[in-house]
Image: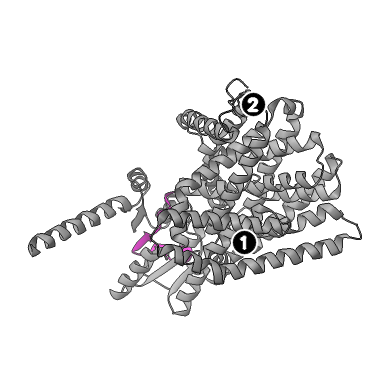
Amino acid sequence: MLLASADVSPMFSLLALMLVGVVAVSLVLLRLRQSLLVAYFLCGVAIANTGLLESVAGERARETVVTMSDYGVMLLLFVLGMEFSLGELKHLRRYAFTGGTLQMGITMAAAALATGAYFVLPWTQVVVVAVACALSSTAISVKLYQDMGISASSGARLALGIAVFQDIFVIFFLVLLPALIASGPGSQELGPALMGAVAKGLAFVGISVLLARFVIPHVLHAVAVTKSRELFTLTVAGLCMGVAFLAALMGLSVVLGAFVAGLAVSECMYKHRILSDVAPIKDLFLTIFFVSVGLGIEIAPLLKDWSIVLSVAGGLIVGKALLIAGIARFLGLSWRAATAAGIGLGSAGEFSLVLMGKTAELTTWSGELNQPLLAAMALSMALVPVLMRYAQPLGQWLEKSYPDLLRRRRRGETKHRGGVGLSDHAIVCGYGPVGQALVSALSAQGVPSLVIDLNAQAIRQLQSDGRHALFADAAQREVWKLCGVDRAKLVAFTFPATPAVEAALGYVREENPTIAVMARTKFKSEADRLTEVGADIVVLDEQESARAVVQRALGVLHLDQAGS
């Protein structure tokens, strides 16, 4: 307690120690090319196991950690709720419901059997452990895909679809958890208790829908017209806390309340302004959460249970990665996409730790089990950023060595086995704003085009308009045969996902070494790499944006001078 002071709040002392420690550890790990998420976790472990925790925060340090973690999780899930998109779910429904159902069902069954076989636990706790093992970290996977520049790839979209399904599932499970723990399976009171929990959950959702439709937009509009940024930010924070408090009053989790508050705000017209206001502190929420996870890990008691920790962490990562990769292949994705999705979702998740903590509040965990499970889940989350560095090389090797292993052919591929009846055409990969503009320009010049995209709605609309379009992954070899790339004049990759484009370029050049290939990327280093692997023209987003800004700025100045 050497550094603790009666004049300083324990929470302030702990927060200061966390942030200073994170900066120091992060600088070291960045030099070692490790993920910042690993740094956050290790910082928490170091603080908790070197005596600094009690020295700085005093005797009530553990209580402060729990409070800090609660706030971090609540604020983090509020942001995740805002970023949750029902429109995106509609586009990802094939991945979400098919992939999510298979992943959750198989993982829960395997985890329940393993837990029941090796640990003496009530069935209620076995169910909780099974659900916790089946969940993955949305925050980690999304951040990793963004950092790697593959957030628009089919593997990232599959991972997002499964993660969305997991979030929906765990929201319902959190509603039922108190009744399940209180009554226990087989109890005569279980049925009425579950019905009561469902009724409370539906009532809460109903109230939230009413607030989202009739109250929250008007409140935000009234605040927005004041043009006070501080008041707007304060209002958003108040809505988050208010809805979370309402959930607590109804006997539900504040974490559930915060997530639903984010959902309520996500559909209003002020969503993007809210996200822009929250963005600067979003990383702080993520930091607090992962450091708090590390703070809850005590190394000394775990040394005798190291085999359990390593076995559970290894089983989670290997088992879930293999399962999700197999599901990806079943859905027709390439090995590159399958490995990215599998490793990205191979860990436990934020909700896993929330579930374990919530269960600890409602019942008594075995002291010999709770810490090892929490440590194993946290360790799996810390390992994913490290393992993701090997996802793309592994996918490339599997694509070359076992291209047809576990792959289920899409119906569209069988139907178009002979390829499209086009020649001297352009193949446009991606039908976002850039792809749409290119297809429109080519059509105006009389150049036939074929679109490849994983947006089912866009492909369906194109086909209904009589245009050539394939719902397919450009990183798959057989797609290029279906597109008639050997008879085409141009291939244009209109999305800036360099690893996916790099993989597809190899297949394009094998089928047609002389075809003109255009690619798009964000950074100069990526442009050089694409040129090396076969792209003839690389459009650099930064360069084009700079040229447009300079031209517009000079134009504006010239007009001002002419008018003066």
Q: Residue placed at 80% from the left, 35% from the top?
A: 367
Q: Is 51 placed above or below 227 here? A: above
Question: Marks 2 and 1: in contact by CB < 8 Å?
Answer: no
Q: Amino acid at mark 2?
A: Glu
Expressed as whole percent of the image width and height from the top left, the position of residue 267 reads 52, 66
In this rendering, would 420 be left or right of 520?
right
Question: Is 424 a magenta residue?
Answer: no
Q: Judge by depth and name the residue closer to the eye, 457 or 266.
A: 266
Q: Quadrant of the C terminus?
A: bottom left
In this rendering, would 268 be left or right of 425?
right
Colouring style: one colour
Expressed as whole percent of the image width and height from the top left, the position of residue 270 reads 46, 63
Residue annotated with mark 2: 54
Q: Judge by depth and name the residue closer to the eye, 51 or 520.
A: 51
Q: Residue placed at 69% from the left, 27% from the top?
A: 299
Q: Which residues are magenta?
A: 481-499
Residue annotated with mark 1: 96
| Residue 226 lies in quadrant | bottom left
Question: Is 498 a magenta residue?
Answer: yes
In this rendering, would 92 be left or right of 351?
left
Instruction: Check disc 1 and report its element: helix, strand or loop.
Output: helix
Q: Residue placed at 50% from the left, 47% from the top?
A: 282
Expressed as whole percent of the image width and height from the top left, the position of residue 457 reads 51, 71
> What crowding class fits label 1: few (fewer than 14 Cα within 10 Å), some (14-19), or many (20 or more)?
many
In this orientation, does residue 332 appear? no
Q: Amino acid at mark 1?
A: Ala
Mark 1 vs mark 2, foreground winner is 2
Q: List the single residue furthest toward the front.
A: 7
In this rendering, would 394 be left or right of 118?
left
Expressed as whole percent of the image width and height from the top left, the position of residue 50 reads 62, 23
